[in-house]
Image (cartoon, rainbow, N blue to C red):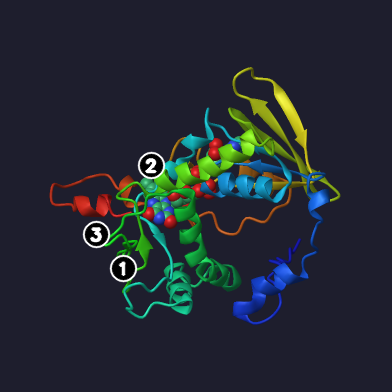
Amino acid sequence: MSIILDAKIPRGDLEDKWDNHKFDSKLISPANKRKYKVIVVGSGLAGASAAASLGELGYQVDCFCIQDSPRRAHSIAAQGGINAAKNYHNDGDSVMRLFYDTIKGGDFRAREANVYRLAQVSNQIIDHCVAQGVPFAREYGGLLDNRSFGGSLVSRTFYARGQTGQQLLLGAYGALNRQISAGKVKIHARQEMLDLVLVDGKAKGIVVRNLVTGAIERYAGHAVVLATGGYSNAFYLSTNAVNSNATAIFRAHKKGALFANPCFTQIHPTCIPIHHERQSKLTLMSE
Ligand SMILES: Cc1cc2nc3c(=O)[nH]c(=O)nc-3n(C[C@H](O)[C@H](O)[C@H](O)COP(=O)(O)OP(=O)(O)OC[C@H]3O[C@@H](n4cnc5c(N)ncnc54)[C@H](O)[C@@H]3O)c2cc1C
């Protein structure tokens, strides 16, 4: 059986595609948003941000995670930093260059429209995180510091010492908590998604195991966001948390979601065993 992949790339020129998509999407009246429930599986940087933003927009959100606190998602381990085309050093950076470097770094296999969008909103992401209180490193004058990182020829990596992921997650977690206390987001910790429920081919619910009681429970919504992170524990060597496995995306795949290339995952320097005293420890701390 041949399957045709429709990645639903928005229409138009590269730089306009996602703006077109936003314009083409129907708006929902603020009065009606509370009638829609979105299930977000995962509470890392992706899930916590999505849940907090959807809650702030007015939707009802149910957010699930395996850990006892959303704060313990594996995003906490990220170290090196986050890229943005601010061009503070006037060293030739631009949205186009960040886009090009990212596409090249991904061996020209990533979807161009999505990578362009990432580069396009990169500056706003930094501003957003600063507004959330993320303590990015600063120069003595008080301006945000950044560094050249990961082989890049320009300085565009914003960082918080070696704990960027932890500090970003604290920011996202703060935003999430605000929506939890506002009653817009309900957090379901210690729940593992076991299956995805489809209605007419669309994801409308999940089945979970309550990891405290062992009970199997089901939840329904109008849409499901899977933000369940990496799956590198499928490989022999991994420094990801043990629940960074393929459980959720495997279930989605079983329900018909296409899964492109399981090898397209980062080999992180932290999982390279130390074989020799001359092996650079800097490599081990590089990201
Ligand atoms: C050591 C290290 C350093 C890194 N350094 C950088 C860096 O410098 N810069 C950079 O950009 N990136 C870096 N990364 C990568 C980056 O951290 C991750 O890509 C990103 O944090 C992933 O976020 P996420 O929200 O998708 O996933 P995660 O933070 O892993 O969150 C996944 C969530 O899904 C939940 N979940 C998973 N399965 C289920 C299930 N079946 N049921 C219910 N819930 C489930 C988990 O409980 C968790 O809440 C680094 C990663 C590591 C490990």
How far apart, in angstroms, are the residues tagged by discs 1 and 3?
25 Å
Residue at the farthest top position: 213
Direction from residue 52 to residue 207 in the image, left or right: right
Disc 1 element: loop
Can see residue 118? yes
Residue appearing at x 65%, y 35% in the figure: 193
Which corner quadrant of the image does residue 39 belong to?
top right
Residue appearing at x 82%, y 56% in the figure: 29
Mark 1 vs mark 3: give the one in front.
Answer: 3
Direction from residue 28 to residue 284 in the image, left or right: left
For label 2, count other residues whose C-alpha is less than 10 Å away and answer few (under 14), some (14-19) or many (20+).
some
Badge 1 is on which residue?
151
Badge 3 is on which residue?
140
Q: Circles 1 and 2: CB distance less than 8 Å? A: no
Q: Amino acid at mark 3?
A: Tyr
Front-most of 98 and 56? 56
